[in-house]
Amino acid sequence: MQAAGSDERWATLQRDSLAYGFQEKRSDELLSAAGNISSRIAELGEQGLSNWLRDDIGHLTATNHAWSEALSALPFPLLTTNYDTLLDEERGSAVWTNSPDVQAALAGLSRKVVHLHGIWDQAETAIISGADYQRLLSSETAQHLQKAASSLKSLVYVGYGAGLDDPNFDQLIKWHRRKFVPSAVPHFRLCLNKDLATLQALHAGDHIHPVAYGDTYDELPKFLEKLHPTPGTVAISKAGIVQDLVSESQSTFSSQLIGDSIIRETLQGDDELSLDDVVLPPVLLPVPHAQYIKSRRVSKDSPKIKRLDPHEEAHGHDVVIVVGDENSGLTTAVKWLALEAARYVGGAAPLYVSFRSCRPSGTPLHDQLVIASRNVGLTGKRDKTLPDHVLALDDFSIYVPKISDRVLSELARNEAVSTIIGCVQGAEDELVERLRAVGLTATVRYLGRLSSVDVRKMAQMASPGHYAELAKQVLEVIQSENLQKTPYTIALLLAVLIRSGVVTPAASQTSILDDYVGLILGRGDPHDDARLGLDQTGREAILGRLAQALVAARAGGLPESDVVRVMQDTFDRLGWGERPSDVLSSFLDRGILRHDGKHISFYRSSYLHLFIAKRAIVAPEFLEELLLEPLFFAAAITDYAALFRHDARLIRKLAELLDDDEWVAQPGGVFDSIEPEAPNLEELVPVQTDDTSPVDVDKREPLKDDTTTVDIYFDSLDDDDRPPFPIADESDMTPVFRLMRTLELVSNTLRDSDQVEDLPLKQAALTEVLNHWGIFMSLMSTDSSLKDFVSQMLAETSDLSSKSPKVAEEMTQEWVRLFPALVSAGGIASGLASRRLTVALDRAVADKTIFRSEQTVIAAAFFIIALQDEGWIARLSDLLKEQGNIWVIRNFLLFLCLGPFIEDTVSQHDEDTLLELCLDLAQRAYTYRDARDRSQHRDSIRRSYLQNRLQARGERRSREAIGDDEADEG
C-alpha cells in the first residue's frame, strides 16, 4: 500500500473510477502491423471485420472467473480497452461512440462497462489501425469524457502491462501532466512486485503511482476485494455504483456557471460544453486596474506589472479577497476561483453564499452554507455538519456592521479549506484589517479588464468560424462607445453580433450599441409582458424622457428626487401606474443607471447619448433644441443619424456648418511641392537577369488577422467613462479644433444617413466634407502651436539632444506634417468611409467637382484607400494622375498604398496593379537621364518592396509562433 504514495491517496479509491484492460504494448511497429491486418481484412468485404471480431473475440471464455468476478463486483465505473464482453454479462456495455451511455456510466448512473476502444459485436467501433486511432482522437466527445474522468476521478490501471503507450492513453497522460502540475487527483497502476521499481522510475514525472498487489497474477482478485468500501461510509447510487458526492457537487457548480454564461446562449444545440468552452478565467492583478495600465505606459526599461495566473491564485492562499466594481464580473470570478480551488484539493465541495442572503441573527454564514450544501445533496435535511468545502462568499459589505461582524467572526472559526471573498473596490483595505482582527490573513487580488487577446478568445468561444471579424468589431465598439472591457460587456456584444448575423466592418456601431442596451433592458425576455408591467420599449420611453431632462439641465446627472419626479411625470402623461422608486431600482440593478454621489446618472455616457437620440426621433422639437448647439450635442446627433437614417434635412442643416469662410487652406505644410531629384544609381540593387527570383511572391500562406496597432491602443487605455458633454465651450475652441469637431459630426452623419434618397444632396455634402478635411490638414500643418506640441512630444519620446540641430529640426518638421495627415486619414477612415457613398464619390469624379482643389483630391484618396472597395486601385490611379510631387503624396499617401501590398491584404489579382501604382508614386520624386535609368531604378524599387513584403511575412509568422499568451504580456 505504501507504494501508492500515501494512505490518504489510496483511500480516494473508495469513491473513484477504475480503468481496466488487458493488452500488450502498441508500438509504432505493432500499429503498422495492425493497419496491414486491418487492410487485409477489409479486402474480404464489408462483413470481413465483423466476422473476424466474432470468430476471434466473440467466442472468448474466461478460464479464471475469479478475475472477472472480482472486477465486476466492484461498485465503481469500469472502463476497458478490450473488445471482449467477459465483464459485461451482468453490467452491460457502453461503447465510446455512444456518449450518453458513457456519460451515465462515468457519473455512476449505470453499471455498464465502458469500452474505450470499441466492442466485438459493433465492428464500426473497433479501434485497431492507426486510422482508427485518429478517428478516436478526433472525436471531441470521446476525448472530453476521457479528460473529465482523468481530471476529477482517480483512475486505476489494471492489467495494462506496457499498454499505456497506446496513442489514446499516451495523449491523455501527456494532457493531464501538462494541465495539472501538481495533480490533486492521483492515478494508480497495479503491477507485480517485480515490476514496481521499473514502473516507479517510468512514472516519476507524472501523476500515476504504481501499486504492487503481489508476486503472481493469481493474487489480484483478493487484492481487488480489499477495494470494496466499508458499508455506510459512502453513498451508493440506484445503479449500485459509489457516488462521489463531492465530485458531483463540483460538476453541478460547473454546470451552473456554464448555464449562466452569455456565451453559452450563443451556442445553441451544443450540450456537450465544458466550463473552459464558455467561461474565460478571471483577469487577476496585484494592483487596481488603473495602476496596472499606468505601469504599461511607462518607458520600456521600467518594470511592468504583470497579470497573475488565476489557477495559481486559486491554489496558493487560504483567504483571497477579489476586488471588482459594478458589472465587472465579480460573481463569476469568485465562483470560478472557488471551483478551481475545490478541484485542486479534490475532496472539497465549492459552496456559494451571497452576503446579501445572510440575516443579522444566529449564525448567518453557517446557516447559508448548510442551505447550499443541502441544495447539492451533500447533507440531509436535518444534518448541519458541513463537508470539506471551499467557501465562495460574494457581495461582502463592510457597511452592514451587524451582519458583517457576525460573518467575520464565523470566518475565524469556519473550517473551509480555502475562502474566496468578493467585495467592491474601496472596501478592501478595511476588510483586510477586520479579517486581521479576527486572526485571518487575506491576499487581495483585483479584477482587471480584458485585453484584446482575451476578447479574441471569447469571440472564438462564441463563434469559432468568424471569431477574428467578431473580435475586431467588438474592439471597435468598445473603443468608440467607451464601454467597460469586462466579460459581461464583451459577451453581450458578441451575443448581439451573432444573433443579428452581423460580421462585417460596415455594421453601425450605434446600432450594435442599441442592440446591446436592448438586451440589458430585456429585449427578447419571454417573461416581459407589456400588459402586466414594463417591457423593453416601455423602459426605453422612460429613459428617453430622463435623457431629455438631463439635456435641459445641461448636466450628466440629477438628484434622485428629480429623477423620481421626471419618471412620475412620464407615468402621469402616459397614464401608467408604475412606482418610480421601483422602476429606478430596476434600472440601477440592470446597470443602465447608477448612483454617482448624491446624483443619478446613466451608467455610461454612451447610454445617455443613445437615449437622447431615441427621444429626438419621437420628439422633433427636441431635435431642434439639439441642433441649436450641434457641437455640444454632437455625440447624440451622431447616434440620431445612425438610428434614423433618412433625415435629409439633417444633412442640409449640418453641411451649412462648413460654409464658414474662416476655414481657408494655407500654402505649404503637407501640400508643399517637392522638387524631383536624381537617384543615386550607384547604390541601386543589381537586377537579376536569370529566371531565378529572390522573392517567391506566389507562395502564399493564410495568415491570422493581425491587429497589433489596435491591440496596443486597446490594451493601453483604461475604461473610465468620458464626460457626457464637452468640457470646453465652443467659443474657446481654436478654429482648427472647431473644424475637426465639425468634420467629425458632419462625416458621421453623412455616412449613417444612407437611406436619404437625394443623391445630389449627398454628392454635394460629400465633396464639401472632403474639401474641408483637406483644408483641415493644411491648417493644422501650418499652425504654429502644433510645432510646439510636436517638439515637446519628440523630446519626451526620443533622444533629440543627441541629434544635430539640423537633424532635430528636420525630424520636428516632418512630424509637423505627418501628424495632420494621420489625423485626417484616420478621421475619414473611421467617420466617413462607407461603400454607400462610393456612387456619390464617382459622380463627383465624373463631373470634375472633386478636382476643385488638391486638398479635396487628397482627402478623396484617403477615402478610397480606407474603403478599398472593388476597383479601388484603378479609381485611385485616375484620381492621382494629374497630381504633382507634393509632400503628402510622396511621404504619406504612398505608404498608405504600400501597406496593403506589404501586409498581403490585397488579392493576387490586384497586387501587381497596386505595386505599379506605388512605383509610379515613388518615381515622381526623381528625375532621370534617360528611359534606361528610369527602368533600372524602377526595378530596384520593386525589388526593395518585394523584399519588405517577404520580411513582413516572416515577422507575422514569428508573432504567430509566440502565441496569444505571450502576445498578451507583450
Image (tube, helix red, strand yellow):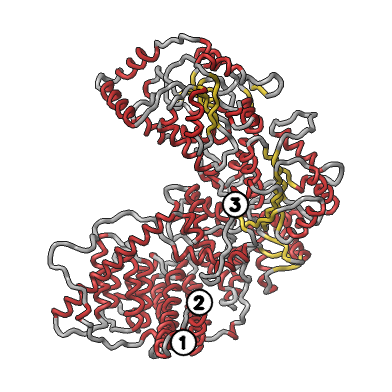
Q: Which kind of residue does numbered mark 1 sit on?
A: Trp
Mark 2 or mark 3: whose residue is earlier in sequence: 3
Decide: few, some or many residues near mark 3? Use Cα within 10 Å; few <14, some 14-19, many ≥20: many
In terms of secondary structure, where does tag 2 sit?
helix
Tell me the quarter of the image containing the N terminus. Answer: top right
Residue visible at 48% across and 25% down in the picture: 195
Measure how far apart labels 3 and 1 are at the Cα level.
51 Å
> Percent from the top left, x then y, of residue 377?
70, 30
Give 61 or 334, whichever is nearer the viewer.
61
Is the residue 900 above or below the residue 96 in the image?
A: below
Q: Which residue is mark 2?
A: 654
Give 794 or 558, whichever is nearer the viewer.
794
> Percent from the top left, x then y, of residue 955?
36, 62
Measure how far apart labels 2 and 3 are at the Cα level.
46 Å
Q: Which residue is mark 1?
A: 663
Q: Quadrant of residue 60?
A: top left
Mark 3 or mark 1: whose residue is earlier in sequence: 3
Whether residue 618 is visible here, answered yes or no, is no
Disc 3 vs disc 1: Cβ atoms closer than 8 Å?
no
Q: Which residue is mark 3?
A: 282
In terms of secondary structure, where does tag 3 sit?
loop
Of labels 2 and 1, the one closer to you: 1
> Percent from the top left, x then y, of residue 473?
47, 59
Q: Which kind of residue does numbered mark 3 sit on?
A: Pro
